[in-house]
Amino acid sequence: MSNLPDTFDLISKFPVDVLRQEDFYPVRQELEQIVVSKNIGTEEIDDETGLKKTNLNRIFAIFIYLIGRHLKEKFYREFVFFLMMYRKALNELGWKYREGAGHGPAPDPKMNVEFCALNNGELAPQVSNEFITEKWHKYVSQYPLKGFKVLGIDIESTKNAVFLTQHFCNWLSLQGYTDAYLSINEEEG
């Protein structure tokens, strides 16, 4: 995928005023590289799994670049915030899910190794339920979301986070980053 079309300035609209640097820095670096080169680059395929080997930080940047340029600027900030919270959940929970899937033990916590820096998207959908049910409200309450209209702590905003989670995880599958699909289990009253 080269020669990608121009877009509004995804870098200057990145919500750095809402996020902490540790929440976004590696993804923003990847995004800057994509924006400057207007090229996502070649992604290697794992011969064993058939999935792309691209690390999650790069995947988040690709998703932001490809989808973000089709969004209204006001929602773009919320979209990126959501993705950085999902990334935060992956960094907190990912090693547990990786070990549970039989991919070996997590690195020593003292090494402070980010899950998203070393892993591809294969297990990204695995954290979705825990992200929504246990992490989303905790995360949202820790950030100043002034001006956010779609995402927040209320029920409707949480539903929006569920839909964004489903969209992101299914995009991962369609792009060959994971084999998992998410569907919403609508409980009947």
Image (cartoon, grey):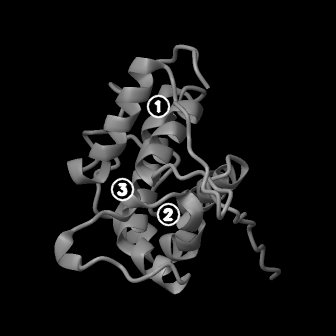
Would residue 21 be found to the left or right of residue 50 on screen? left
Q: Is residue 170 above or below residue 90?
A: above
Between discs 3 and 1, the one toward the N terminus? 1
Q: Residue 162 or 156: which is nearer the viewer?
A: 162
Would residue 187 be found to the left or right of residue 80 on screen? right
Between discs 1 and 2, the one toward the N terminus? 1
Q: Residue at x 28, y 48 (%)?
A: 19
Provide residue 81's location: percent of width, then percent of height. Answer: 41, 48
Q: Is residue 149 above or below residue 87?
A: above
Where disc 2 sits, the SS reads loop
Q: Nearer the viewer, mark 3 or mark 1?
A: 3
Give me the C-alpha separation between circle 3 and circle 1: 28 Å
Q: Nearer the viewer, mark 1 or mark 2?
A: 1
- Whether the residues at callouts 2 and 3 have beta carbons within 8 Å, the answer is no
Name the kind of residue labelled 2 in the image: Asp
Provide residue 50's location: percent of width, then percent of height. Answer: 68, 57
Q: Residue at x 56, y 81 (%)?
A: 101
Q: Residue 59 or 162: which is nearer the viewer?
A: 59
Name the kind of residue labelled 1 in the image: Lys
